[in-house]
Image (cartoon, helix red, strand yellow):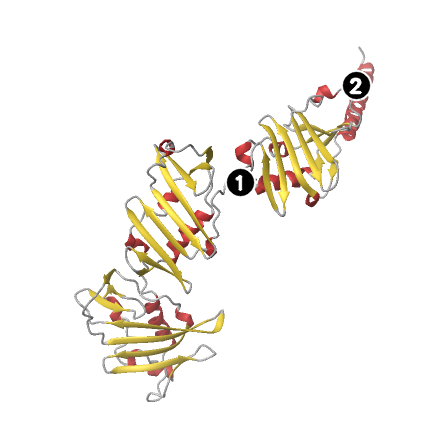
Amino acid sequence: MSWKKIAVLLLFLAILAAAIMYVNQKEKDRQAVEGTLLAMPSASVEKVELRNSNGRFVFSRRDTTWFLDAPLTAKAEKVALESILDNYCQLKYDRLVAENAVELKDFGLDRPEIELKLFAKDGPATTILLGTNNPLDGSSYARLAGGKKVVTIASYKRGDLEKDLFAFRDKKFFGIDAMAIGALEFRHENSSFSFRKEEGRWFLEKPVHSLAQESKVSDILASASNLEALSFAPAPGSGAYGEFGLDKPILIAEFRSPSDARKIAVGRKGEQYYALAEGAAEICGIAKDFLDKFSIDAAAFREKKVALFFAFDVREIAFRRGAFDFTAHKDAAGTWGFAAPVSGKNPDQEKIERLLTSLADLEAEGFIDGAKALPPFPTRIALKTEDPADPGKQGSIVNEFAAADGETVIVRNPSLPYLFKANKEILATLPANLGDLCEDEAKAK
């Protein structure tokens, strides 16, 4: 064969390949057209019905909350329902497979695997049908009931509809309002505790009276308000609570607000933990870390700080240590000055702030409850504070220090009915004379 014939043949093959590629691309362009299969306002949907391999589910919206109506009555998982509405009320497809499909069996749409009905207010239901998965990219064939257009939608959208009953249920079964709780009582194993909130502060009342650590009480309240079920089981009949360890609960806790009281019991069976809210019809499996919030002794709940304040909120300090005393004020510009001129000297701003910071950070190493004979307190520091968020709200704080006893110094906060044991190092931060607070002469010049 001559080279001319070979060249002609190669040219013919190139033209044929180009033509095939062109036709295929035109077909792909015709079919691979992104578009919208359904457009309806998600806010108009008041009811949703779903049938999948896990069963039939019915949801209804009441005000802004979604509820599960079938196969049982419960609060629905908000995120799950919102995801369905977001993805299906404005249903975008990736590819148009057929404009007027005749053989629905080819796409599994003659007997759809998933059926979703969206009911808008005062309108007919809109039904979306999903067939088999496309083996090439995992997408799903879909169409509207009564329609002939077949499209593919992304696999993650199908995932919204393949959930089971547990996934569609709201897992928060206790749901207290942490901000409204004003009292807390609980018994954990053999220890009983009682807390009360007064003027914005939490107090431990039982087994000992003490200011409580806000963070630890808040941690319990937050955990209770967000407590989620890992499983649900119908509450058994009388005398059958032993299988959940609830015949002898590890924990019984009551949360009280001005308008309500909620009680919960927690038991253990093997390595599993179960909770039963008072009045509930179901027992919920929970994570162990909820119990851990209660598994500390009274000393760990007590507030270690001698006084709760921030150094930058202090507006006045009145200090007395033996025969030495002074009073200083902070003006509107944030500058400290002595109440009356003291030999023409000015307080060193950093030294005043360091003093206040050491007092604000002072923590107890121990407590003295029910002290009968109080020791003398040669040092007294009175502070006046102002809330920056509410300038008209002022506070008063007093700290009194005894002489050092070994490595310890006893400190009193007269607003609390007990004493603190602190490290004696705090005494070294307190001024012994005016020179300890004033500016250096070189600095002053």
Looking at the image, which residue is at 28% across and 45% down? 190
User: What is the quadrant of the C terminus in the image?
Assistant: bottom left
Q: Which mark is residue 146?
A: none
From the viewer's perspective, is 368 left or right of 262? left
Quadrant of the image occupied by residue 115: top right
Task: Provide the residue designation for mark 1.
Answer: 170
Quarter where residue 53 is shown = top right
Q: Position of residue 90 (x, y in %)?
A: 71, 40
Give above or below for 395 relative to 162. Answer: below
Quadrant of the image for the N terminus?
A: top right
Q: How many marks?
A: 2
Badge 1 density bin: few <14, some 14–19, many ≥20, Cα 10 Å:
some
Residue underneath mark 2: 13
**Residue 145 can be seen, yes or no:** yes
Residue 198 percent across, percent down from the top left: 40, 63
Q: Amino acid at mark 1?
A: Asp
Residue 350 image position (x, y, % from top left):
37, 74
Q: Indicate the secondary structure of the residue bearing disc 2.
A: helix
Farthest-out residue, left: 406
State the residue at coordinates (46%, 36%).
282
Q: Residue at x 48, y 74 (%)?
A: 391
Q: Nearer the viewer, residue 348 or 291?
A: 291
> From the viewer's perspective, is residue 222 above or below residue 428?
above
Secondary structure at numbered mark 1: loop
Q: Mark 1 or 2 closer to N-term?
A: 2
Query: Can see residue 90?
Result: no
User: Is 402 above or below relative to 197?
Assistant: below
